[in-house]
Image: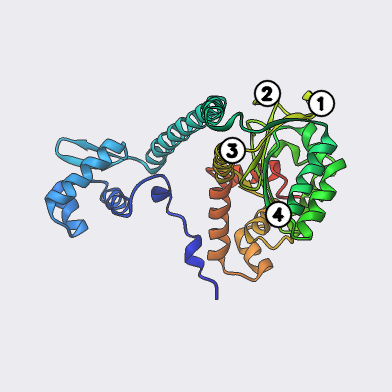
C-alpha cells in the first residue's frame, strides 16, 4: 500500500519552525499557562535547554512570557504571524529576482567587453518573424537531439499565437524525441480557446507546463548555448513583430536558465494529462458538494487519505483554507474535466 504519511503536512514546520520548536509550542499550548519548570517537566528535558528554546519561540512571536510564565498564543494568531513572516521573505526573494532580471543587460555588457577584448564581439543575431522563431527551434533540435527548450510566455496574445499556429511542430518534435519542452505560462491564459487541448497534447508527449500569476517577460533557452531575448525586457513578441535577439553565449544562457528554474520552482503544476491526480480528484468531488466520507467511498480510499490530499492541495495552491483552495483550483482550470 502507498505510504500515506508522506502527505501529512505540519503547518508549523511548513512555516519555518523546526521539529523541536513545533513540539515545544504544542506542549505550551496544551499547558495553556506554565512556568519554565512545568514546561521542562512536560518536555522531559533540562530547564536551561528548554529556556533557550522558549526564548526562540518568544522572538518568533508564537509564545508570550508574562511574569515568569509562558503562554502560547492562539494558533490562529501564531500561524498568522508565521505566515506574515514567510510572505515578507517571499516578497524579498521576489525583489531579488527582479534585481537579477535588471542585471541581465549589465552582464551582457560585461561579457561583451571581455569577449571583444579576446576575440571580437560575441554572436548576437536579430531575428524577425514568428515562423523563423518556431522553425529555428526545431532546426536546432534536429542538429543535437534531444534539445531542452525552456520558455516563458508572459501574455495571452503570445499564448494564443502559439497554440493556434506553432504548437504542432514543437509537439511533433517532442513526440519524436527531438525536443524536451518546459514552459511557464500565466494562469490567466488557461481559459483561452485551444490552450487546454494543445497543452494536454504537450503534457501527454512528455513536455512540462506550469503556471504563475505573472510571468515577467518572454524569453527562451535552446540547449546550453542559445537563448532568445525580447527586443525589450518585460515585453512580449507580437507587440514587436516577433523581433528578438538570438544570443549564442553560455553566460547569458546560464543566467536565463537559472531564472527559468527559479520561476519553475515557484510555479504550480498543471493537473491535466490523464486525470489520475488524487489531489485534483478530491477537489472536483468537493466542488460537487460531497463530504469527506462520501469522497472516500467514491474513490475507494481511507478518510485519512482524503484529508491528506486536501492538505496537499492547500500546500500546492498556496491556500489557507479548503475554500481558498477550491477558489484557486477553479481559477487555474483544475476543476474542468
Q: Earlier in the sequence, mark 1 or mark 3?
A: 1
On residue 22, the disc is: none
Q: Which residue is mark 4?
A: 144
Residue at 70% from the left image edge and 57% from the top image edge:
146
**The N terminus: image quadrant:** bottom right
Q: Earlier in the sequence, mark 4 or mark 2?
A: 4
Q: Which residue is mark 2?
A: 232
Q: Earlier in the sequence, mark 4 or mark 1?
A: 4
Q: Which residue is mark 3?
A: 256
Q: Is residue 171 above or below residue 99?
A: below
Residue 194: x and y in percent read 84, 44
Residue 23: x and y in percent read 30, 54
In this rendering, position of residue 276 left or right of residue 44: right
Q: Nearer the viewer, mark 4 or mark 2?
A: 4
Residue 142: x and y in percent read 77, 53
In this rendering, position of residue 321 left or right of residue 34: right
Q: Which residue is mark 1?
A: 241
Q: In this view of the protein, can residue 185 be seen by the observer?
A: no
C-alpha separation, residue under disc 1 versus residue under disc 3 = 22 Å
Amino acid at each position: 500500500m502507498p505510504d500515506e504519511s508522506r502527505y501529512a503536512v505540519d503547518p508549523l514546520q511548513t512555516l519555518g519552525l523546526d521539529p523541536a520548536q513545533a513540539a515545544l509550542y504544542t506542549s505550551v499550548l496544551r499547558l495553556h499557562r506554565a512556568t519554565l519548570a512545568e514546561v521542562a517537566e512536560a518536555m522531559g528535558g533540562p530547564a536551561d535547554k528548554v529556556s533557550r528554546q522558549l526564548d526562540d519561540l518568544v522572538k518568533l512571536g508564537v509564545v508570550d512570557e508574562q511574569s515568569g510564565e509562558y503562554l502560547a498564543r492562539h494558533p490562529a494568531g501564531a500561524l498568522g504571524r508565521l505566515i506574515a513572516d514567510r510572505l515578507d521573505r517571499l516578497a524579498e526573494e521576489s525583489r531579488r529576482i527582479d534585481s537579477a532580471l535588471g542585471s541581465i543587460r549589465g552582464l551582457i555588457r560585461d561579457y561583451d567587453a571581455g569577449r571583444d577584448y579576446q576575440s571580437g564581439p560575441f554572436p548576437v543575431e536579430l531575428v524577425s518573424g514568428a515562423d523563423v522563431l518556431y522553425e529555428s527551434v526545431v532546426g536546432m533540435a534536429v542538429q543535437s537531439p534531444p534539445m531542452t527548450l525552456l520558455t516563458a510566455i508572459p501574455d495571452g496574445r503570445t499564448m494564443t499565437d502559439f497554440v493556434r499556429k506553432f504548437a504542432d511542430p514543437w509537439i511533433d518534435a517532442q513526440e519524436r524525441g527531438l525536443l524536451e519542452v518546459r514552459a511557464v505560462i500565466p494562469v490567466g491564459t488557461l481559459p483561452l480557446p485551444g490552450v487546454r487541448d494543445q497543452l494536454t497534447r504537450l503534457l501527454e508527449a512528455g513536455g512540462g507546463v506550469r503556471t504563475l500569476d505573472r510571468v515577467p517577460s518572454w524569453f527562451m533557452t535552446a540547449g546550453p548555448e542559445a537563448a532568445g531575448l525580447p527586443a525589450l525586457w518585460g515585453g512580449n513578441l507580437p507587440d514587436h513583430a516577433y523581433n528578438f535577439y538570438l544570443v549564442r553565449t553560455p553566460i547569458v544562457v546560464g543566467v536565463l536558465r537559472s531564472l527559468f528554474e527559479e520561476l519553475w520552482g515557484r510555479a504550480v503544476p498543471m493537473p491535466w494529462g490523464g486525470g489520475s491526480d488524487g489531489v485534483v480528484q478530491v477537489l472536483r468531488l468537493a466542488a460537487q458538494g460531497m463530504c469527506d466520507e462520501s469522497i472516500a467511498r467514491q474513490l475507494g480510499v481511507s478518510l485519512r487519505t482524503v484529508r491528506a490530499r486536501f492538505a496537499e492541495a492547500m500546500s500546492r495552491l498556496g491556500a489557507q483554507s479548503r475554500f481558498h483552495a477550491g477558489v484557486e483550483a477553479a481559477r487555474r482550470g483544475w476543476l474542468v474535466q
